[in-house]
């Protein structure tokens, strides 16, 4: 009851804030994977022309979303009435003040049916970006059709929408009722797309960003990201930039400033001149598949995949882990290292059957120590796993070249470090 009252009050503040500041454009990002990377990429590009507000974390739930839109910090103690009273005062002040931003870029998450549609009851975005429809929180959604209906609802209650053509099946077009919809992706089937010309680990992708019907000739850009799926976030940012009226120079400058978000295909330097692909923020089948594809494309003497269990998959978990195991290519990988019970029970046997050398551990710390022992000069190591009970960023620490890079990892606040210390003490 307490949470419901707080939520309703915050939503009323957002509704009033947007009504009294009609010049502020609200852009939302939703989808099964890639929300934060896409949000930050959009904010990076739009900052070339506009004053932009976005929360660089993943504040996308019922209480944190309104606060992020208003630009008010989330309280440390959510049960404190005095803390919420101070927030309400700050919200009323924000409503009365002149607008301090031109654009708000906000991600909207969902872990059960109805959360994304509910957002549309108190805010009407100028643009919605839908990044993907894939397995997420399947203990609640049960089917992909339910996931699609949830995520694509954002396209219908927004003025305009941009849909990722690569990661949303065409059959879900039936869920769309908004006529103002465009697509983006990495092939020319999408109206906004990117043609790759070159790639290197140090410089990322060089290629052409195209906006069909907008540019006669595309814009040549160098984007410093890893993995084709990361390019989709870049293209989404470019598409939003076009819709928001940026010039070609502004688009080029903005796109070339995009960098990986911590824990999301972030390239780090490891010991023995190795390449670390830090994708430890979270994991789902589609995200793991994309990360493995990026690893396979590298030309290095040794490749190791450290894969943690994927959480929140419900009854689909056994099949999903088995599928990921089947995606592990024994001709590409020197080792598949698993962390967590589901990864050991379902992923590991499938990977072994596919010709991989597999080693399983209960703890990320054990996995990191093993990788440190077996990695070769110039190797590439992918770390990918879910948050709860896995925490593969702690395995990354063991093979980092410099402890200074620990600040670039996810979940490094004192609160998180204490949670993880308590967790690892059980092993």
Image (cartoon, grey):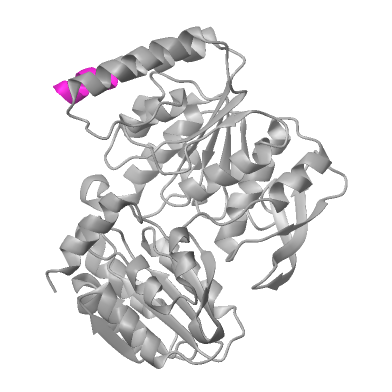
Left or right: where does residue 180 sit relative to residue 222?
left
x then y, percent, for residue 10: 33, 19
Labels in figure, total: 0
x then y, percent, for residue 251: 75, 43
Establish if 21 lies above or below 180: above
Specify whether residue 5 is painted magenta.
Answer: yes
Left or right: where does residue 352 sit relative to residue 173?
left
Question: Which residue is rendered at x = 49% and y = 82% of the image?
Answer: 271
What secondary structure prevails in the magenta region?
Answer: helix
The answer to whether residue 263 shows anywhere in this view is no
x then y, percent, for residue 335: 39, 88
Left or right: where does residue 83 sit relative to residue 186?
left
Q: Quadrant of residue 370?
A: bottom left
Question: Which residue is rendered at x = 37% and y = 38% of the image?
Answer: 150
Establish if 145 lies above or below 158: below
Establish if 275 lies above or below 30: below
Establish if 168 lies above or below 327: above
Range drawn in magenta: 1-8
Which residue is at the front of the view, 353 or 67? Answer: 67
- Residue furthest right in the image: 216
């Amino acid at each position: 009851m307490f949470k419901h009252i707080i939520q309703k009050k915050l939503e009323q503040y957002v509704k009033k804030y947007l009504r009294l500041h009609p010049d502020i454009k609200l852009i939302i990002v939703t989808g099964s994977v890639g929300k934060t990377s896409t949000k930050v990429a959009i904010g990076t590009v739009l900052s070339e022309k506009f004053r932009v507000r976005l929360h660089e974390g993943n504040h996308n739930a019922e209480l944190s979303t309104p606060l992020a839109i208003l630009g008010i910090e989330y309280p440390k103690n959510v049960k404190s009435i005095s803390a919420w009273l101070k927030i309400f005062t700050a919200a009323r002040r924000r409503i009365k003040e002149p607008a301090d931003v031109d654009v708000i870029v906000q991600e909207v998450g969902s872990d059960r049916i109805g959360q994304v549609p509910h957002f549309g009851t108190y805010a009407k975005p100028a643009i919605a970006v839908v990044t993907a429809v894939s397995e997420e929180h399947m203990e609640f959604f049960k089917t992909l059709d339910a996931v699609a209906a949830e995520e694509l609802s954002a396209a219908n209650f927004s003025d305009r929408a941009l849909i990722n053509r690569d990661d949303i099946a065409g059959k879900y077009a039936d869920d769309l009722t908004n006529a103002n919809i465009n697509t983006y992706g990495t092939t020319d089937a999408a109206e906004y797309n990117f043609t790759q010309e070159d790639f290197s680990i140090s410089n990322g992708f060089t290629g052409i960003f195209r906006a069909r019907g907008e540019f006669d000739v595309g814009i040549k850009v160098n984007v410093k990201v890893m993995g084709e799926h990361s390019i989709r976030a870049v293209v989404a940012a470019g598409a939003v930039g076009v819709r928001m009226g940026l010039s070609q120079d502004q688009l080029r400058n903005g796109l070339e400033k995009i960098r990986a978000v911590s824990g999301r295909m972030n390239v780090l330097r490891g010991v023995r001149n190795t390449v670390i692909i830090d994708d430890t923020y979270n994991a789902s089948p589609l995200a793991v598949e994309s990360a493995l594809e990026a690893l396979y494309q590298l030309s290095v003497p040794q490749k190791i995949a450290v894969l943690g269990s994927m959480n929140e998959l419900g009854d689909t978990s056994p099949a999903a882990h088995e599928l990921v195991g089947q995606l592990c290519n024994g001709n590409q990988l020197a080792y598949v290292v698993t962390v967590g019970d589901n990864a050991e029970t379902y992923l590991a046997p499938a990977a072994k059957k596919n010709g991989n050398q597999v080693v399983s551990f209960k703890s990320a710390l054990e996995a990191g120590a093993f990788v440190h022992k077996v990695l070769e000069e110039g190797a590439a190591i992918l770390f990918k796993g879910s948050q709860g009970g896995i925490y593969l960023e702690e395995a990354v620490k063991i093979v980092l070249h410099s402890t200074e890079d620990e600040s670039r990892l996810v979940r490094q606040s004192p609160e998180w470090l204490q949670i993880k210390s308590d967790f690892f003490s059980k092993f």
